[in-house]
Structures are given as structure tokens and as C-alpha cells.
């Protein structure tokens, strides 16, 4: 390149590279500090002052209001336990472990983070309202069509995301990056 | 008339420009990542609190399919927000749990960083009495309490004083409905949340 005639080219390259790298870094989930339990993922540092700059930027761009560490923790599932993307054309059964928390809620969202329209106008379930068996166990049926028992309506749009929020985790669950914390398994049933 | 450069000379001459472009791109990327949380129109502070007067609460609508609030909002959470600007004075937060609905408070900076959060099981009798101050205001309070002329001006026993690392931000109060049909009761607890600007210590 010949002297200062290269300056505009270098400036354009700087802008293009810098903005492309920024857009790429802010796509998708926060790159650091995640905890995975089965199909569920969480980013506990979103809730305290140790949040990293990339996660902070992603939260701002995506318009999320994360839970504070003293409030609880949100877990997100984009796949079932086999790793297949969640799809409302299929039924899902959630059962097994429940977080050691005072209270938890479960909702289904579109990929843009909005609650999914459904004919029942029901947008989630709570641990306090679940029908349980004599041992305290439960099973949640996530499906488009109504199901007896604990039904989580999925609406009609194909791809969806499940979010489970555990409020006021017990101290043992908070310590050690959720060591031993149980969450429901997500098992796909029939697809239409 | 400049001498004609060989391809190798041209390549070597481009190296400083390539390095400069790379370093500039890294700097631009880092600046953008650091600046975005405060500048993004989707950021929680800009979306929920920017236009609120300091010390006044706003009750957020329940999350539904069409809601324009934060993404991935919990439909069982009744939320209130309050903006603070400690240059106008310390912020007093008061709230009380009703014993049924889980309640929590979080104090956030303009870039979304959460500097404090607690729930009703972590506070005496499920009551919150939080005073958010700057370090200078905390020092002034301490000096006033050491002054014998200011006797009786001490903090209440249940007061938690929180020194905010920056003077501006917002507070989120959250009350949770235990089941479908319980939202109005949770919202009533949420409605009791108070935030107000206090006079700075003299």
C-alpha cells in the first residue's frame, strides 16, 4: 500500500471488522459462565455484579431483565434431553427433579422471548399449583392440545423455548454452582 | 516521479496498515461492547426507568403475548420499578411481604448491573428498609452520627444501607403470584412498594 492513500481503506476495514466482531459476539447466548443441568442452561452471574461485559451487552440488546442472585435463578431449555430442538408440533413430558427452591414457575416462549399465544390464555405453571402424586412427584405435559393434569400450552408456532425460574433457592443449591440441583427431564413424545 | 514498487515491497508496506486496522477493530469492538448496555434502546433502564422521575415508582403491566416489557418475563411476577439519581439525595426503599407471596428487591445500575438483590426470607420479618446512598453520602451520615449535636439521628435497627458504586440506576420490586388467578393478590403486595428521595445529611 502506498503511503497515506491507504488510510481510507484501513479505516473502512477497522469499522467493518470491529462492527462485525461486535455483532457476532452479541448473537445468541452469553459465551461465558453457563451452568448446564440436563437440557437446562443458566448463567448465574447475570444476577450479580460479577457479570462479564459480553453478557451485560447481550442482556441489554435482548431486552432481558435478569433475576438478581438474591431473587432466584432462571434456567432455559432450547432442546429436549436428547438434544433435539423443542418443536411445538411435538408433545413433551417434564418430570423428575425439581429445584430446591421456595417456589418455581415454568413458561414457554417464542424464540424472541415473548409468551406464546394459545387458546387457553395460560402462560405457565407454578410449583404451588401442580397436581402431584402421593410421593410429591409430578409430570407436566407440554403440548398444543389440552391435556389432563399439569398442562403447559405451547401454542401453534413451531420453535419454542422453556424457561424455569427457581425463586429463593436454598443455600445448598446456590453453593457450588448448583451442585446436586435437580431439574425436570424433558422427554419428547408424539409429533404430528 | 516515485519509483515503481515490487509486489513484495507493496506487501511489506501494507503490514503496518493491516496491524493498525486490526488494533482499531479490536478497540472499536471493546468500546461497543462496553457502551451498548447503557445505550441500547432495549436495555432495561432505558425501556423501563429512563423517563421516570427519580423516587417515583411505576407499576409494570403483566407479561402477556403482546406485552412490550422485558423479554422472557415471568407471567406470574408483578413488577414495579423506581429510578434513582443519588445526586438528588439518598433513595429510601420500603416494602413488606404478606407472608404468602414471595417478594424481592433488586438494585440495578443504568447498564443493568445488579448491585444488590434480596428476598423477603433474608430480611427481618419480611420487611425491606433499604437506604441507597453514594459513598460521600454514607460518609456524611457517619460524620453526622459521630457529632453529639446530631444525637438521635441514627438509622433504624432494620435499615440496610447500600452504597451504590454509581449514582444512577433503578430498582425492581417483584411479588410473585402462586398460581393462575392469584396475580391480583400479588399485584396488591407489589402496590405497597415505596421508594422516595430523602434529604441528604447536612
Image (cartoon, coloured by chain):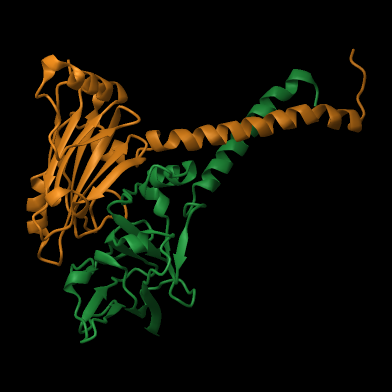
Q: Quadrant of the N terminus of chain B?
A: top right
Residue drawn at x 55%, y 47% as measured from the top left: A24
A108 with respect to A15 (left or right)? left
Q: Position of residue A118 (x, y in %)?
A: 23, 69
- Is residue A151 or residue A9 the one in the foreground? A151
- Is residue B175 or residue A187 the one in the foreground? B175
- Is residue A155 or residue B117 the one in the foreground? B117
Residue drawn at x 22%, y 70% as measured from the top left: A127
User: Which image quarter: residue B128?
Assistant: top left
Please determine whether, in this image, residue B10 is positioned above or below residue A100. Answer: above
Q: Colour of chain B?
A: orange
Q: Colour of chain A?
A: green
Please determine whether, in this image, residue B183 is positioned above or below residue B9. Answer: below
Residue placed farthest to the front in the image? B148
Residue A44 seen = yes
Residue placed farthest to the top in the image? B1
User: Which image quarter: residue B172?
Assistant: top left
Residue drawn at x 42%, y 55% as measured from the top left: A43
A10 with respect to A177 (left or right)? right
Amino acid at each position: 500500500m502506498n503511503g497515506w492513500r491507504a488510510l481510507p481503506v484501513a479505516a473502512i476495514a477497522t469499522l467493518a471488522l470491529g462492527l462485525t466482531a461486535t455483532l457476532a459476539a452479541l448473537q445468541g447466548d452469553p459465551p461465558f459462565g453457563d451452568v448446564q443441568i440436563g437440557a437446562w442452561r443458566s448463567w448465574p452471574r447475570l444476577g450479580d455484579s460479577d457479570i462479564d461485559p459480553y453478557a451485560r451487552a447481550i442482556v441489554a440488546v435482548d431486552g432481558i431483565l435478569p433475576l438478581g442472585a438474591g431473587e432466584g435463578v432462571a434456567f432455559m431449555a432450547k432442546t429436549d434431553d436428547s438434544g433435539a430442538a423443542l418443536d411445538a408440533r411435538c408433545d413433551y413430558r417434564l418430570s423428575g427433579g425439581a429445584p430446591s427452591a421456595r417456589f418455581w414457575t415454568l413458561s414457554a416462549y417464542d424464540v424472541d422471548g415473548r409468551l406464546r399465544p394459545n387458546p387457553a390464555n395460560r402462560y405457565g405453571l407454578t410449583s404451588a399449583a401442580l397436581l402431584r402424586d402421593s410421593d410429591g412427584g409430578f409430570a407436566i405435559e407440554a403440548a398444543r392440545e389440552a391435556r389432563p393434569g399439569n398442562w403447559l400450552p405451547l401454542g401453534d408456532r413451531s420453535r419454542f423455548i422453556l424457561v424455569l425460574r427457581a425463586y429463593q433457592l436454598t443455600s445448598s443449591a446456590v453453593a457450588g454452582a448448583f451442585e446436586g440441583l435437580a431439574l425436570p427431564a424433558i422427554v419428547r413424545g408424539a409429533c404430528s | 516521479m516515485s519509483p515503481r514498487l515490487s509486489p513484495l515491497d507493496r506487501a511489506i508496506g501494507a503490514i503496518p496498515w493491516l496491524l493498525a486496522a486490526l488494533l482499531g477493530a479490536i478497540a472499536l469492538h471493546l468500546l461497543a461492547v462496553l457502551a451498548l448496555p447503557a445505550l441500547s434502546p432495549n436495555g432495561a433502564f432505558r425501556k423501563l426507568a429512563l423517563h421516570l422521575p427519580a423516587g417515583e415508582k411505576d407499576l409494570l403491566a403483566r407479561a402477556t403475548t403482546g406485552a412490550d416489557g422485558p423479554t422472557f418475563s415471568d407471567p406470574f411476577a408483578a413488577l414495579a420499578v423506581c429510578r434513582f439519581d443519588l445526586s438528588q439525595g439518598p433513595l429510601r426503599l420500603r416494602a413488606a411481604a404478606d407472608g404468602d407471596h414471595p417478594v424481592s428487591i433488586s438494585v440495578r445500575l443504568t447498564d443493568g448491573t445488579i448491585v444488590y438483590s434480596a428476598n423477603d426470607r433474608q430480611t427481618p420479618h419480611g420487611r425491606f428498609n433499604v437506604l441507597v446512598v453514594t459513598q460521600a453520602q454514607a460518609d456524611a451520615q457517619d460524620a453526622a452520627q459521630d457529632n453529639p449535636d446530631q444525637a438521635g439521628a441514627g438509622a433504624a435497627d432494620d435499615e440496610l444501607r447500600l452504597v451504590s458504586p454509581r449514582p444512577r440506576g433503578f430498582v425492581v420490586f417483584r411479588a410473585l403470584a402462586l398460581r393462575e388467578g392469584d396475580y391480583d393478590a400479588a399485584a396488591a403486595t407489589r402496590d405497597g412498594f415505596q421508594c422516595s428521595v430523602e434529604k441528604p445529611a447536612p
